[in-house]
Image (cartoon, rainbow, N blue to C red):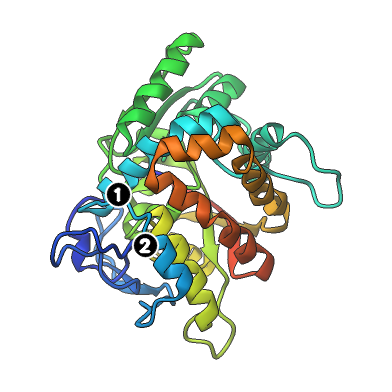
Amino acid sequence: MIALESTSFMNRTCVAAQTSHLAANKKYGNIGQIKSTRSVFGKNKKSHKISCNIVKSENPSVVDRVLQVFTTPADTLNEGIASFYDESSGLWEDMWGEHMHHGYYEVGVPVKDHQEAQVDMIDNALKWACVDGVESMLDVGCGIGGSSRHIARKFGCKAKGITLSPRQAARANAISQEAGLQDVSFQVADALNQPFEDNSFDFVWSMESGEHMPDKDKFVGELARVCKPGGRILIVTWCHRVLKEGETELKPDEQSLLRNICDAYYLPAWCSIADYARIAEETGLRDMKTEDWSDEVQPFWGAVIQTALTPQGFFGLLKAGAGTLRGALVMPLMKTGLVKGTIKFNLITATKPLN
């Protein structure tokens, strides 16, 4: 959940946190729509926009006001994201280990060890996407590198990862070096302006980073650009539900729930998996398929909440800082959103054509 565009998003209508601590007129703006006119394979694309179906509240609720107290100051969305993960990643590693994403829990089967479930998430996503071999991979929004190391070991491949958080990149490199993984490395970079040549990786992986992207077209476009022809892209991400026929936006209570989550986790506009599918098709990707694993991740947030309520978790939150505490306060909203069906845990995979 890490890499973002750093340029002029203050004028965008898709934004993350509205905070009273920002300097005058340095607000992220209203959570609204995403626009893009970027070409992907060197061809001009017709611009379109994605409705995130969330509007700014003119009458903040009690929850809004309470969460506002714990807002961490930031002048740009990228800085907010980097600060949040710089602050919180150490605590997460202490409590949960190297994997900073949901676990996979088979429906109808007793809940397993949660760290094992996180590894199962990686393996089941790879299996679902028919990934049975990799030579070089890119991990977009790499956290502290758990997915990269697991996939590198699994396939014996080279791996690079990018994050906005300097602390995450440093920690990811340290763990990899200690493990003797010489062909696994991490760096600070923007997912919407990646420092790699075209056609660099045969597998491009994004595990729970897409929700941080303010420009979903450019996000998918960059994944496609750095992917080799014939290579595969796999995005695992939080989405909002697909709108029903006749709906133009989410219901007010759904908007309020997502807005509070956006504020806490520095998230811009949410979109649906249908939006991602349309973007992938317009980008020129092939062999696309999508899936909904919302049921398979249901036990996760309850487990995270329980961990936060332990003495180690509670004092760790206080020590980590206001931003991390704010994130903890909205964890029940993530659980509620999944149960109600407002939030979806989706996967999308596709291949880059050979020509």
* Amino acid marked by disc 1: Gly
Residue 321: percent from left, percent from top: 39, 41
Give the answer, above or below, for where 198 lies relative to 66.
above
Residue 191: percent from left, percent from top: 32, 45
- In the image, what residue occupies the spot 44% across and 77% down? 53
- Residue at the disc numbered 1: 80
Q: Secondary structure at mark 1?
A: helix
User: Which label belongs to residue 68?
Assistant: 2
- In the image, what residue occupies the spot 49% across and 25% down? 135
N-terminal label among 2 and 1: 2
Label 2 – label 1 distance at C-alpha = 14 Å
Q: Is residue 298 left or right of residue 52?
A: right
* Amino acid marked by disc 2: Gln
User: Which label belongs to residue 202?
Assistant: none
The part of the image, by quadrant, that contains residue 125 is: top right
294 or 225: which is nearer to us? 294
223 or 20: which is nearer to us? 20
